[in-house]
Amino acid sequence: MTFTVAVISDNTTKLQYSDDGLQLISLDVNDISASQNLNRDISAFIIDTKNAALAHSWVIAIRGDAEYFSHLLYLHHFSHILTDVNVPKSSADLLQQLNDWSQRKAQLRLSDSSQLNHQVIQYLWLNKSRCITVKKSLKKEKGFYYPLLDLWSDVDTAGKLAWLGKQCNAGFLQKVKLINRTRSCKQCDSAMLNFIDTCPSCKSIDILTEQALHCFTCGHIAKEQTFQRDNRISCPNCLTQLRHIGTDYDRPIENIRCNSCNNLSINSEARAQCFSCEEDNDIDRLFINNFYQYQLAINGLTLAQSGSLDAPLPVDLRESVSKEHMAWLLNWLIHTPTADETQFHRLIKIRIVNYQQLLQEKSELLAEQLLSDFRQRLAILIGDQNTFCDMASDVWLYAFPFTSELALDEFKQQLLNIAEDAVDNALEISVVEYDLVEKKEEGEMLSWINRIIEQQ
């Protein structure tokens, strides 16, 4: 088998590979437009230039290409977070890596890259040494970002953190190690903060540390300099000569003085001032952002090799089931009439009406946190007999088998109370009730579920 390798260079230095299994084609590193008309038979790219800007442009162009985003990509002279490590030193090394990539590509059954998680899974699968990791940048409000996800998605960093969390919960990705941790403003979620010591009494930043002495004879407390007289220490108030610390005098614990209110305190109070929105934050109330490195988890590996994933039943009955399982359950309930005339089977659809508004007013992460708090309180109302399906970020389905009218009305009222009591922002929710007995003629249950999800 012959592999086509594109060597992108500026003709100053070149890596030499010579083997019957390799077909090398040369591209001019200065002609970045050539990246739009690449040979579709290319299996790998080697960028060989000492021009960092041109090298970066080519990396972005290749990784952003729908055809080549997951191909082998090596960068000589530099390191880049979006390239493959271990630039082949010989033809044998290059052929070995190409064969490994080709074998994994042949095993790949996931061909749709229109969904972000499918695209990420393909990228990680084709080279097992790859990972999703972060990079530091002062241009980003959170101080860190995921370059690969930034290239493939326009969602902000907070949204990407929420997305990565969902992929881990679904078993597609797993955390490898914690790279860094930041704290961000509770108002705008920016990590561009100025930590400054303030007076614990009036919050003024005009404070200073001073050394003071305490005279045991008269109880006078003042700056240490005022006790210095003719190379001796004596109290400026009672004129007693102070010879032995602990016997004649001591140093008070309080040594922080505020020039605004003249308050004397033991410690200052640290505050976090946001550079983005100028919010003055209590440090204990800052949002904590953990930035991890990620690799494929078991469900991601399974999806890559099989092309589909049969979602298992949840271990915890309060966890979300798959849409397919919900369809099966509803179909079973339709054909299982209740023996008690006061009981019935119902499906409840809960939609967050102002979800898009929350995303606009706050980051996706903050919106997710708000919905998570709402769901935690909602879980208290749900019994073990109720099956739950998370259809979308703003749409949830609950099956209520063998339920009375009184119990259902009580649930809906408590649901509305929780939404109104949501911290910081009241959630606007809609609750739609479906009588499963009336849906016997609806036909294929999964199609019906998809239709009611789309309904406002």
Image: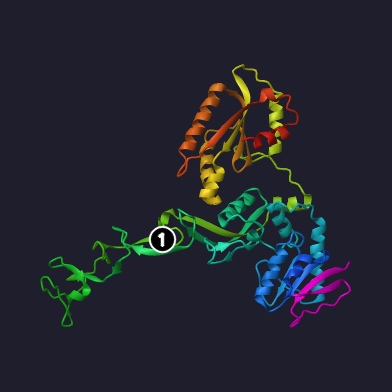
> At which x and y percent is residue 316?
61, 39
Q: Which residue is painted at 59% across and 32% down in the image?
A: 384
Q: Nearer the viewer, residue 247 or 100?
A: 100
Q: From what the image shows, is residue 387 above or below residue 264? A: above
Q: Horizontally, is 312 left or right of 342 in the view? A: right
Q: Is residue 157 magenta?
A: no
In the rendered image, residue 6 lying in the magenta stretch gets the answer yes
Instruction: Point out the stretch of residues depicted in magenta.
Output: 1-28
Q: Position of residue 342 (x, y in %)?
A: 59, 18
Type of amino acid under label 1: Gln
State the residue in front, 357 or 88: 357
Q: How is the image coloured?
A: rainbow
Instruction: Identify the secondary structure beneath mark 1.
Output: strand
Left or right placement of residue 152 versus residue 190 in this view: right
Kindly tell me whether residue 10 is visible in this rendering. yes
Residue 189 lies, with reference to residue 318, above or below; the image says below
Residue drawn at x 42%, y 64% as measured from the top left: 194
Residue highlighted by disc 1: 273
Pointer 1 local density, CA inside 10 Å: few below 14, some 14–19, many at least 20: some
Q: Residue at x 59, y 37 (%)?
A: 318
Q: Quadrant of residue 260?
A: bottom left
List x then y, in percent, for residue 312.
70, 41
The image quarter containing residue 104 is bottom right
- Above or below, 97 against 323 in this view is below
Using the rendered view, name the quadrant where residue 17 is placed.
Answer: bottom right
Count of marks placed on residues: 1
Q: Quadrant of the C terminus?
A: top right
